[in-house]
Image (cartoon, helix red, strand yellow):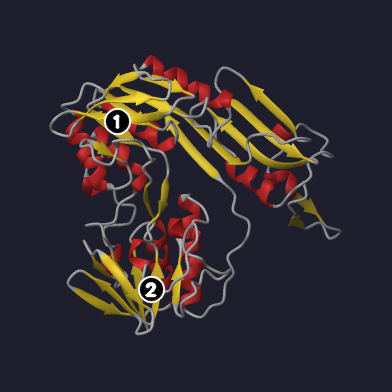
């Protein structure tokens, strides 16, 4: 059987790995728009110079050769013929028995007057973006970033490493609002400001101004504030890469529409990762790639409806991790503790943990994830929730043997 995978990100590589583990003889081809496999999570380290292209990869050097996976770089897919089962691209086509679409997502640029016609404006999604930002940053004195989420702050942190500060515009009233609560996020807010970055919160960019050469020279906010700018980085989110599907007949909505087995509306075509719009996290993309691969092989495996948001952040030597819901809803209770070295908070709903934030000390995160996934009621525990561990889930049966239960 011949498996073709479009995309070499987390989902695509996970699928290729699973296909080879389960089938030693099947043909596996990866069509990649990129020149090699690399982690988008590390692009800010490329900007800072901490990592060069050869160490951005998240697979072993011999992964493709060892697993007999054909990797074709710099392939721009232009369409899919689902009737004849062919992938079309510039300069040719490739047939398939099973196809996985794992093209990920691309930067979403907001509707701002003058933005699309202006030079020196970049997203931060691909290595090409990171290269352009790093090259231009060395000549820039007024760098502006739109978006104070994780990607925007990754860009700001990478620039700080090469001695460049930035002004960050954010429509929310807090940074990292989808990743951390206000208390945990304020730790980074203070440290970025101490390093020379400036934040404009609760504000939007309404216009981009350019010079006679079409290069950006300033942005204008919805507060009618003009801010000088010679390099603009847009970090306002992403949208699935679907452009090449227009004539394929494959159904899309927010992303590619898939069923519980990650199969699309077309026979023998599957989708996984950001292109499905199901989530935008690395662990979820890896899981979806594995599940899609199993179904491509005829090993029927449903995608579990247990996605648990998980964010890991590390700036200025301070690690943070959030799992699940970290903002309480009506009726929820919270338990928190804080000292000079750490901040920790858990959200409880009817006695069951639904989310946790760990900052400073992010150990035991696996334990919290299991509590949340297994919906363990912790209200009857005889000790503080912060003292409970995996050991409390081991019990002794009538024969004196230990057995495991998640009911702590």
Query: Residue 60, position in %: x, y?
Result: 31, 57
Query: Residue 163, position in %: x, y?
Result: 24, 22
Do the residues under discs 2 and 1 have CB atoms within 8 angstroms?
A: no
| Of 198 and 354, the residue lying toward us | 198
Instruction: Tell me: residue 285, above or below residue 108.
Output: below
Residue pictured at 56% horizontal, 69% vertical: 259
Query: Residue 30, position in %: x, y?
Result: 30, 68
Instruction: Tell me: residue 93, above or below residue 33.
Output: below
| Of 278 and 252, the residue lying toward us | 252
Q: Earlier in the sequence, mark 2 or mark 1?
A: 1
Secondary structure beneath dot 1 equals: strand
Residue pictured at 73% horizontal, 49% vertical: 375
Residue pictured at 80% horizontal, 41% vertical: 350
Secondary structure beneath dot 2 equals: loop
Quarter-of-image position of residue 314 = top left
The count of marks equals 2
Query: Residue 84, position in %: x, y?
Result: 34, 85
Q: Please say whether residue 381 is visible from this viewpoint.
A: yes
* Label annotation for residue 290: none
| Of 15 and 222, the residue lying toward us | 222
Instruction: Tell me: residue 168, above or below residue 55.
Output: above
- For disc 2, the neighbor class at 10 Å (few under 14, some 14 to 19, many from 20) is few
**Real-space Cα separation, disc 2 to disc 1, in angstroms:** 36 Å
Q: Is residue 39 left or right of residue 141?
A: right
Circle 2 residue:
248
Residue pictured at 83% horizontal, 57% vertical: 397
- For disc 1, the neighbor class at 10 Å (few under 14, some 14 to 19, many from 20) is many
Circle 1 residue:
208
């Amino acid at each position: 059987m011949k498996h073709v995978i479009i995309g070499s990100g987390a989902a695509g590589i996970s699928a290729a790995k699973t296909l080879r583990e389960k089938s030693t003889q099947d043909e596996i081809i990866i069509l990649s728009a990129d020149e090699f496999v690399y982690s988008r999570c590390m692009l800010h380290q490329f900007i800072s110079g901490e990592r060069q292209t050869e160490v951005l990869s998240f697979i072993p050097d011999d992964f493709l050769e060892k697993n007999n996976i054909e990797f074709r770089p710099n392939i721009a897919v232009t369409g899919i013929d689902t009737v004849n089962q062919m992938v079309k691209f510039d300069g040719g086509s490739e047939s398939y028995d099973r196809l996985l679409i794992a093209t990920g997502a691309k930067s979403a640029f907001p509707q701002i007057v003058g933005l699309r016609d202006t030079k020196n404006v970049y997203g931060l999604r691909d290595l090409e973006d990171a290269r352009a930002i790093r090259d231009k940053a060395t000549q820039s004195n007024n760098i502006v970033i739109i978006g104070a989420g994780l990607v925007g702050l990754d860009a700001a942190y990478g620039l700080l490493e090469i001695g460049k500060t930035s002004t960050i515009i954010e429509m929310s009233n807090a940074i990292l609002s989808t990743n951390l609560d206000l208390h945990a996020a304020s730790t980074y807010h203070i440290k970025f400001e101490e390093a020379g970055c400036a934040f404009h919160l609760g504000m939007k960019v309404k216009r981009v101004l350019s010079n006679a050469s079409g290069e950006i020279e300033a942005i204008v906010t919805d507060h009618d504030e003009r801010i000088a700018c010679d390099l603009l980085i847009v970090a306002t989110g992403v949208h699935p890469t679907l452009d090449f599907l227009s004539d394929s007949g494959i159904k899309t909505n927010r992303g590619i529409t898939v069923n519980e087995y990650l199969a699309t509306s077309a026979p023998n075509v599957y989708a996984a990762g950001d292109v499905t719009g199901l989530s935008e996290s690395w662990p979820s993309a890896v899981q979806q790639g594995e599940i899609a691969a199993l179904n491509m092989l005829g090993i029927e495996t449903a995608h579990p409806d247990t996605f648990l948001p998980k964010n890991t952040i590390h700036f200025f030597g301070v690690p943070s991790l959030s799992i699940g819901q970290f903002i309480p809803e009506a009726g929820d209770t919270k338990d928190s503790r804080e000292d000079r070295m750490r901040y920790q908070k858990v959200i409880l709903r009817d006695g069951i943990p639904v989310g946790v934030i760990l900052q400073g000390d992010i150990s035991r995160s696996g334990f919290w994830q299991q509590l949340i996934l297994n919906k363990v009621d912790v209200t009857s525990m005889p000790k503080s929730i912060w003292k409970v561990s995996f050991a409390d889930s081991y019990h002794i049966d009538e024969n004196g043997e230990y057995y495991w239960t998640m009911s702590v």
